[in-house]
Amino acid sequence: MSKRASPSEKPALPRRLLIANRGEIALRVARTARRLGLEVLGIFSSADAGLPHLRLCHRALELPGDPKRVYLDMHAVIDAARKLGADAVHPGYGFLSENGGFAAAVEDAGMLFVGPAPEQSAALGDKLAGRKAAQKAGVPTVPGTLEPVADPKEAARIAKEIGFPVLIKASAGGGGRGMRVVENEGQLAESIARAQSEALAAFGDGRVFIEKYFSSVRHVEIQVLGDGKGHAVSLGERDCSVQRRHQKLIEESPTLGMPPEAAKKMGELAAKLAASVHYRGAGTLEFLVPSGKDAKPGEFYFIEVNARLQVEHPVTELRTGLDLVEEQLRIAGGLGYSFDPKKLEWRGHSIEARVIAEDPGADFRPSLGKLETVVLPSGPGVRVDAWAEAGLEVSPHYDSLLAKVLAWGQTRDEAIGRLAGALRETFIAPVTTTAAFIADVIESEPFKSGAYDTSILAARKKAHAPDKDRPLPVSAGVLAAADRLSRNGHAAVPALNYRGRGLSAWQAAERTEEGA
Ligand code: ADP
C-alpha cells in the first residue's frame, strides 16, 4: 500500500484531478479545474458517454458494469483514478461524496480527497453523530434523542416528554427517506418499525431517533469552509424553505425576515462546530427556524451537517464572489483559503431554482425520456449550471436535476424578477420540468412577502386553478420551438408547464395563432 496522502506535506494544488461524478456538478468542477490549469480526468457509465463534462476532460475512462451502480463502486472508481494517473479525487455531491470509507481508500491509494477527512465524515455525516458534536460545541439542536431508539415503550416515554407531534428520523438518512411524522402515541410503534425498515433498505442502517416536529418551520443553512487545522469560516446563510417532499426546490440568500444578528449568530456557531472537529473543506450546517405563532424570536436549531459541496453552493458564490470549488482544491492541497476571512463581503441578493425533470402538475412525478429541445436562459445577473442538452437521456437511474438557474440582483425584487424571466425563457422538451412552476412560485404573494414556511408548495397545490385568461408567460422562441416539436409529430408535449398544469405544444402553437 502506498503512503496515505496528506495535504500538509507539500502545499500545492493537485495536478491531475479525477471527477468521480456526472451531470451538472461534474461540469461545474471541471470548469474550475481547467481554469486553475489542472489536468481534468473523468469517468462515465456506458449510458453516459455523451455527457458534456467529458468534453472538458483531458482524459476519461468508461466504468464497465451496470450503469445504475458503477458510480457507487468505490473500487472501480479508485482503479480508474489510478489508471488515469490522478493525484486527487473530487467526489461532487451524492454518490460517494459523504462516504468516509471512500475518502480513506482514496487517501490510502496516495491521492488527495477533495472533501473532509475520512474520520470527519464519520463524526458528522451521520445525523446522530452530528447532533452529538453540535451539543458538545454548544450549538442548539432540535429537542430529541442522542441515541437510537428501538423500544416502543421507551419511545413513548421520550415522545411524551418532548410533546407530540414528533418526527422519527433515520440516523443515516438523506433525501427525506426514513422520516415520519407521528401525531400521537397510538402511531408510534408502527412508525418506528416502518422508518427502521425504510432506512435499512435505503441505507443499510436501520437506526432511528426521535426529534420534536415543528409544524411551521423555515430551513436555513450555513455554508462553511474549514482549513482542517482547527479554523473555520462561515460564508453566510441560505434559506431553503421552498421544498417538495422535504427536498429543496428554491434557495436564496439572505433570508427574508431573519434578523441579521440571528443570522450572524447562526454563522458563528456553525463555524465553531466545524472548527471543533477540525473540519476540512466545504460543508453545510443545516438549521431549522421555527416560524409558527409559538416561535420565539431569534430561536434556531441545528439538524445536520452535509459534509460536502451542496447543490445550492452557487447561491453563496454569487453573493461572496468566491469560487467554492477553488477553495476546496486549495484546502485539499494544504494552501488554505484564497481570501482573508476578515475581509469577506456579501453583496446583493441571490436565488437559485432547481430545474428538475418532474411534473409539478402531477405531484412532482419524474418525467423521463430523451431531450429533444433545450433552450437555456442567459442575461444580466443570470447564471446557469446545466448538463441538459438535446440528444441526452433523462434516465431513472440518476438524479433528475437538469439545470440550476440562478439570478443575482442588488435587491431581492430584482433577483426574483431576473430569475422569473430566466425561467420563462427556459424550455426543455419533451420532458416536463419545474421551471415555469418555480417562476410562478417566486412571483406569488407568500413568497414575495416572506410569509411562508416549508409547506408553501403543499398549500399552493391546493390553490392551483387553471386561469385561461392570463396571457401565456412564454416567449416567441419557446412557442416556435414547441411548434417545431408539434410539427415533428409530438402532438402533445407536456413541456410548457404553466401554473402547474401541462400545456401541450399543440395548445401553445394554437395560442400563438390566436394571438397573431
Ligand atoms: P434529509 O437528510 O433526509 O434531507 P433533513 O434532516 O435534512 O433530512 O430534513 C429535511 C427537511 O425536513 C428539512 O429541511 C425540513 O423541511 C424537514 N424537517 C426536518 N426535521 C424537521 C423537524 N424536526 N420539524 C419539522 N420539519 C423538519
Image (tube, rainbow, N blue to C red):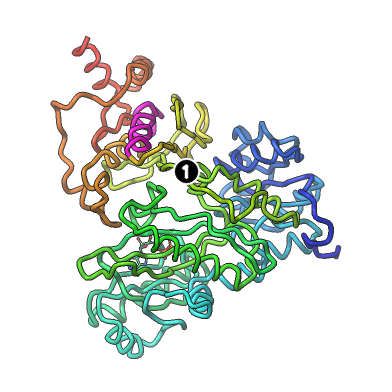
Q: Residues within 10 Å of mark 1 (few under 14, many from 20)?
A: some
- The magenta segment is 413-433
Q: Quadrant of residue 42?
A: top right
What is the three-letter code of the residue carrying label 1?
Arg
| Residue occupying image coordinates x 33% and y 59% | 218
Name the residue carrying label 1.
347
Count of numbered circles in the view? 1
Taking the image as shown, residue 29 lies to the left or right of residue 178, namely right
* Callout 1: CB less than 8 Å from ligand 1: no
Magenta stretch: dominant secondary structure: helix
Up-down relation of residue 174 to residue 132 (above or below): above
Taking the image as shown, residue 89 lies to the left or right of residue 451, namely right
| Residue 23, position as x, y percentages in the image | 56, 41
| Residue occupying image coordinates x 24% and y 82% | 185
Q: Is residue 432 visible?
A: no
> Does the magenta portion include 429?
yes
**Foreground pick, 138 / 27:** 138
Up-down relation of residue 200 to residue 350 (above or below): below
Q: Quadrant of residue 485?
A: top left
Taking the image as shown, residue 494 lies to the left or right of residue 150, namely left
| Residue 251, position as x, y percentages in the image | 40, 48
